[in-house]
């Protein structure tokens, strides 16, 4: 018969014992590792979201504060309607929008320059589970994209399970992943080198 625990016993300790730290090798990967090793898994990490009516300057500040380069954009039902990246905000999109619609930069919202979900590369989680890191890298290069979402289907319902980011993969591999869209790094890019995704 199993012993029933009513209270967890305390143990004796002393001042000056070290705290356990994460294994630095747990944040590294190689190209032959399973692809899910380099996926930001939303079943373990809460995704950072933004409402479409938020101004792009506030969205960029949220990215910097959260250490990410992409925010998932929510709809009125808290479902995901699209994505916005730091490259969207700091690139040509706001300039073009401002010129075309006569809207001052400070009044441009996330909704006006975000990428709708229908135009974001999406991978099937079941297929990702059978893939390797090198497959993700090759696919991202072929798509000429920095980010891709991963969708899991549960009982005929699609859920966004995670995200792949070339900057995060490069960080875990200890190398730079070729990014043909990326221009020479700006000061803002250099300040965001510690980004998660």
Image (cartoon, grey):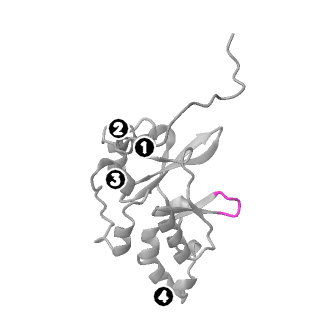
Decide which of tag 2 and tag 3 comes sooner along the chain: 2
Q: Nearer the viewer, mark 4 or mark 2?
A: 2
Decide which of tag 1 and tag 2 comes sooner along the chain: 1
* Horizontal side, residue 85 vs residue 46: left or right: left
Image quadrant holding the N terminus, namely top right
Q: Is residue 78 magenta?
A: yes
- Cα distance in 3D space between marks 4 and 3: 36 Å
Task: Estimate how packed mark 3 is, as few (under 14), some (14 to 19) or many (20 or more) residues with alpha carbons within 10 Å.
Answer: many
Q: Residue at x 67, y 59 (%)?
A: 78
**Closest to the observer, 63 or 12:** 12
- Cα distance in 3D space between marks 3 and 1: 19 Å
Q: Which residues are magenta?
A: 75-79
Decide which of tag 4 and tag 2 comes sooner along the chain: 2
Q: Which residue is mark 2?
A: 33
Decide which of tag 4 and tag 3 comes sooner along the chain: 4
Please tell me whether mark 1 sits on a helix, a strand or a loop.
loop
Q: Which residue is mark 1?
A: 21
* Horizontal side, residue 101 vs residue 25: left or right: right
Q: Nearer the viewer, mark 1 or mark 2?
A: 1
Decide which of tag 3 and tag 1 comes sooner along the chain: 1
Q: Which residue is mark 4?
A: 99
Residue 63, given in percent of the width and then of the height, sits at: 50, 66
Q: Are marks 4 and 3 in contact (CB under 8 Å)?
A: no
Q: Residue at x 57, y 52 (%)?
A: 46
Q: Is residue 32 magenta?
A: no
Q: Which residue is mark 3?
A: 171
Please tell me whether mark 3 sits on a helix, a strand or a loop.
helix
Q: Are marks 4 and 2 in contact (CB under 8 Å)?
A: no
Task: Estimate how packed mark 1 is, as few (under 14), some (14 to 19) or many (20 or more) residues with alpha carbons within 10 Å.
Answer: few
- Cα distance in 3D space between marks 4 and 1: 51 Å
Instruction: Find residue 109 and report its image quarter.
Output: bottom right
């Amino acid at each position: 018969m199993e012993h029933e625990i009513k209270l967890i016993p305390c143990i004796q300790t002393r001042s000056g014992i070290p705290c356990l730290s994460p294994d630095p090798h747990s944040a590294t990967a190689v190209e032959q590792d399973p692809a899910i090793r380099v996926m930001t898994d939303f079943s373990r990490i809460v995704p950072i979201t933004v409402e479409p009516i938020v101004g792009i300057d506030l969205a960029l500040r949220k990215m910097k504060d959260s250490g990410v380069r992409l925010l998932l954009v929510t709809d009125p039902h808290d479902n995901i309607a699209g994505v916005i990246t730091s490259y969207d905000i700091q690139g040509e999109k706001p300039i073009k929008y401002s010129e075309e619609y006569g809207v001052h930069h400070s009044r441009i919202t996330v909704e006006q320059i975000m990428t709708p979900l229908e135009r974001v590369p999406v991978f099937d989680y079941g297929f990702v589970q059978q893939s390797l890191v090198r497959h993700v890298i090759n696919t991202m290069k072929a798509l000429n994209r920095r980010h891709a979402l991963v969708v899991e289907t549960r009982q005929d319902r699609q859920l966004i399970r995670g995200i792949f980011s070339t900057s995060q993969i490069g960080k875990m591999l200890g190398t730079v992943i070729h990014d043909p869209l990326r221009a020479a790094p700006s000061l803002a890019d250099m300040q965001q080198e510690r980004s998660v995704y």
